[in-house]
Structure formats: structure tokens, C-alpha cells
Image (cartoon, grey):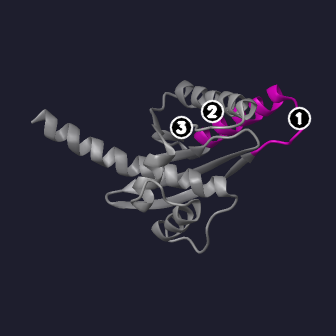
Amino acid sequence: MRILGIDPGIAIVGFGIVDKEGSKIIPVQYGSIQTEAHTPEEDRLLHVYEGMVQLIDKYKPDTVAFEKLFFNRNVTTAMTVSQARGVMILAAVQKGLPIGEYTPLQVKQAVVGYGKAEKKQVQEMVRIYLRLKEVPKPDDVADALAVAICHAHSYTLNSMLNEVLRK
């Protein structure tokens, strides 16, 4: 199963693509979609949407996992990032892909084993888990890989639960 993990943003969208083969999670590609500051918002949203479509077309994921947004301060930023997240979900749904959504707490729990882990701990566990030489940069990329890892674990658990419930 190929998973596209997304850390939503408007300036930087982190993405991480992993393959789940049995109990192994193998990194395929990771990086970011970036938009220029001081560009009209509608142009930035179009760039994010088109970048998402290109990722889906090129890497052909089986599912897409998004980090749920959590903002406690800047409402303007929250609205813009929500719009970017919306166009990315639209791109995935238009391609017929199932969507997974995880809170930052769920992602930390899945990757580190502790829901209140520090950002650096999550990034280092992503590096170790995927056997990478260094932590992916910018931070949004490591976060996207963490979302993909979380989805891989959750998918396995949900599959096992569904199998037990069918019996």
C-alpha cells in the first residue's frame, strides 16, 4: 500500500510518500510544495492544488493522510491554511482516493509512543524509523512523513479490528 502523508500549509506543504509492505514502511519520496509570500491567495491555492494533483499522478498513492489543523492564535492563518487543506482534499477525492485524518496528538502517539512528544523527538523518530541519514527539512516534510507512518499503523490496526469483527 502506498500512502501520501500531508502536513498542510499555504507557504509550505510538507509531503511524504511511503510504501507499507507487511510490517515494513519504506520511504519513496518526500519534499514540499512551496508558494511565494506576497502572491495573491488564489494563485497560491491553485499552486498547492496543482502540486497535489502532480504528486498523485506521479506516485499513484492508494490513500492520502492529512494532519488535522490545530490553531490557538492566528485566525487569519487558520483560514488560509484551511483553504489550502481543502483544495488538497479536493484533489485527492477527485482522484478517488480514500482520506485519513489525524490530530497532532495521534501522530505523536503513533511515531513516538507519547502524545505530548516534542517536535524534535518526532523528527528524530521519523529519521530512525525510515532509516534516513538525516531529519528531512523543512520541518513540514518530517511532519508529513510522520502522518504517513501514523496512517500506516492505523490502517493496519483498523484492518485487524475489521477482520476480528467480521468473524
Left or right: residue 16 versus residue 84 is left
- Vertical arrangement, residue 11 with respect to residue 166, above or below: below
Nearer to the camera, 164 or 115: 115
Q: Amino acid at mark 2?
A: Arg
Residue 69 falls within the magenta-colored stretch:
no
Q: Which residue is mark 3?
A: 68
Which is nearer the eye, 88 or 38?
38
Left or right: residue 155 versus residue 80 is left
Residue 69 quadrant: top right
Please name the residue shown 52% across and 61% down the image. 122
Residue 82 percent coordinates (x, y): 65, 30
Q: Which residue is mark 2?
A: 85
Distance from the alpha carbon under mark 1 to that under mark 2: 18 Å
Q: Is residue 56 magenta?
A: yes
Q: Which mark is residue 115?
A: none
Amino acid beneath label 3? Lys
Residue 100 in the image, given as x and y percentages of width and height: 45, 37
Q: Are marks 3 and 1 in contact (CB under 8 Å)?
A: no
Dot 1: element:
loop
Query: Mark 3 to mark 1: distance in Å?
Result: 25 Å
Q: Quick one: SS at disc 2? A: helix
* Residue visible at 49% across and 66% down in the picture: 125
First in sequence: mark 3 or mark 1? Answer: 1
Q: Which residue is mark 1?
A: 39
Q: Which residues are magenta?
A: 34-57
